[in-house]
Amino acid sequence: MNLAVDYPWVLLALLLNLLPLFNNGVSQSHYPSVQILPADILSSFISVLIKMIAIAAITFLVLALAGLNRGQQSREHIGYGAHIVLLLDISKSMDYTYAGKAPDGSEESKSSAAKRLLTEFVKKRPHDRIGVAGYSTSPLFFMPLTENKQAVLAAISATDLPALAYTNISKGLLMGLSFFQQQSAQTGSRIILMVSDGAAVIDPDSEAKIRRWSKQLNVRLYWIFMRSENSPGLYEKPEDPRDDNAGAMPERYLHLFFSSLGIPYKAYQAENPRAVQEAINDINKLENMPLYYVEKIPKQDLSTQCYLLASLFISLLLAFKLVEAKP
Amino acid sequence: MIENNIFYYRKSAQYNVFPGAHTGKTVGNGLLFKQHKPLIAAPDPRHIDLRASMLNPFSQYQVKSFQQQSRLNVFLLADLSASMGYQGQYHKQQAVIDCLLSIAKSTHLIGDRFGFVGCSDQLKSPLLISPATLQQGRANEIAKQLKSTVLSGQASGLLQAADYLPDSSALVFLLSDFYMPESFIEQQMQRLNKHTVIPLVLWDKKESSDLPRWGIVKLTDMEQGKTRTLWMRPSLKTKIQLAFKQKQQQLQHCFRRFGCEPIFMEQGYSASLINQYFLQITG
């Protein structure tokens, strides 16, 4: 129960609480000498009571104006699952079907298939903390690692943006890795689940960084490669040795690069929606380790209650005002 | 304005040489026989008492001497502190003015001198008739001034008032609400001990018995600025009335110790109450 306010400077108005100490607000009438009046306990009690009510009313009003809330809290959790970063390719080609055509209703596009399947995947894993990022021309940040499944599902459905042009896989990966960099200690396994339908050449700078980070952060990498028809697969070797380079066959070389990272890595070559489903089921089975994490409970606004209390006290004051008598 | 504001009063004016309406101890023209004196001592052959002269063993002429009726100094000492501005069933400030005019008129008619001392924190010098005069106009002037004065402060200046009174015994009306501490009243009475003092206590029904039966009331002291919040209810009201009754008794006891009887005025100034008072002591 840690209370906080949005506008601390408004609390200066609490100084107004001094006012009722000097004057209880009952309209006064002149009297030649109050010394002669006998002491009356009930009267002094009511006088103090009015002051207290006035102080309470002012206090709650000021607290409400200052935006009192039950501050952000955190709760520790231990579950079975993993930290998963969903790294989605949102390049233009994902908007096409597996056959490489624009979706016409009979076949779904790769992006919507990925979205549907990932949604199911997220729903099946209640204890994971999942983050969402996308990449295209540049990386896109959707959702940090969170246990809030609703937020994750919303983030996944938000990836359905009109896609952008290129596939900048290295920057996307770096962003995916950066999710784990913010964690202080490792609990549970860390997984990057990359969904893409193509690959790109990784420049040497990023390559070094990815190598270093993936080792440091101890991540596991799963790559669901949504292969379009007629595009080269991950394991295909070119017939002509001259074509055996990263520029001509980025998928093959990316796969080789991932394999050489020295981290647990698995690639799924999925040619149709069913294959994607299998890949996801596989991960589902594999990644179930004890997971320790801290759940954040968002701050809770208490100003409504404050306003209610303030109006209660003000109506009490009004009642006292109404029973005033004029001598 | 009170229609009949003239009252009757008597007090022996002991050593006042000026002739007047009150019995005095001075020898002079009068109707009351005092003693025989030898003609040498009182050389007034009109009053030679032949019979007494014949009986005198030293065969000296004896002259009758008489007590002279003397003139009296009448003073009004008015408390002009803030609490005297209270407006209840009547306006206390107006009561002070009524009292001033009434006493001035009564003394004028009987031929006595009238003086006035008004005090709040200090003595108010523009509102002062001292020494006492025979002129009534000055009193009217002060009454007019009093009407436009806003009363303020406490009655502590009343102690200085004794300095403005004559050496010889005077008749002093002390007009106040007497809500001051008893020690102050005692001190005041000690300072006025050579005069005959008649305390006029101006109270108002609205202060005590006419308070509301139910409800919250906040009363502000007119002099000290203190406030009291009261939850009025019948039991508290009777308690307050009792307190006022006690205060009345306390005042009576206090004044009786100095040989005078206070006159309580609860419905404004009334000359008939003073009249009654003097008739009672002479009768």
Image (spheres, helix red, strand yellow):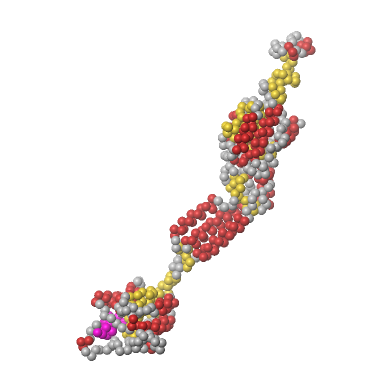
Residue B106 shown in magenta = no
For the point 26% across and 85% down, the residue is A249
Quick one: which residue is furthest to the left in this view? Answer: A242
Q: Which residues are magenta?
A: A248-265
Above or below residue A308? Residue B10 is above
The answer to whether residue B253 shows anywhere in this view is: no
Residue extending furthest toward the top: B59
Tell me which residue sits at (26%, 80%) in the image. A201
Any part of residue B120 in sight: yes
Say whether residue B275 is left or right of residue B184.
right
Work out whether residue A230 or residue A250 is closer to the camera in this orientation and state it.
A230
Percent across and percent down for residue A248 are 24, 84
On the image, the x and y values in percent for residue A303 come to 50, 64
Residue A77 lies, in percent from the top left, at 43, 74
Which quadrant would residue A292 be assigned to in this image? Answer: bottom left
| Near-viewer residue (A166 or B118) | A166
Choose between B207 and B7: the one closer to the eye.
B7
The residue depicted at 54 percent of the width and 58 percent of the height is A57
Residue extending furthest bottom? A239
How far from the left and from the top, in percent, is residue A313?
A: 56, 60
Along the line of sight, the residue nearer the viewer: A266 or A189: A266
Count the marks. Answer: 0
Q: Is the residue B270 above or below the residue B22 in the image?
A: below
- Residue B5's quadrant in the figure? top right
Q: Is residue A261 magenta?
A: yes
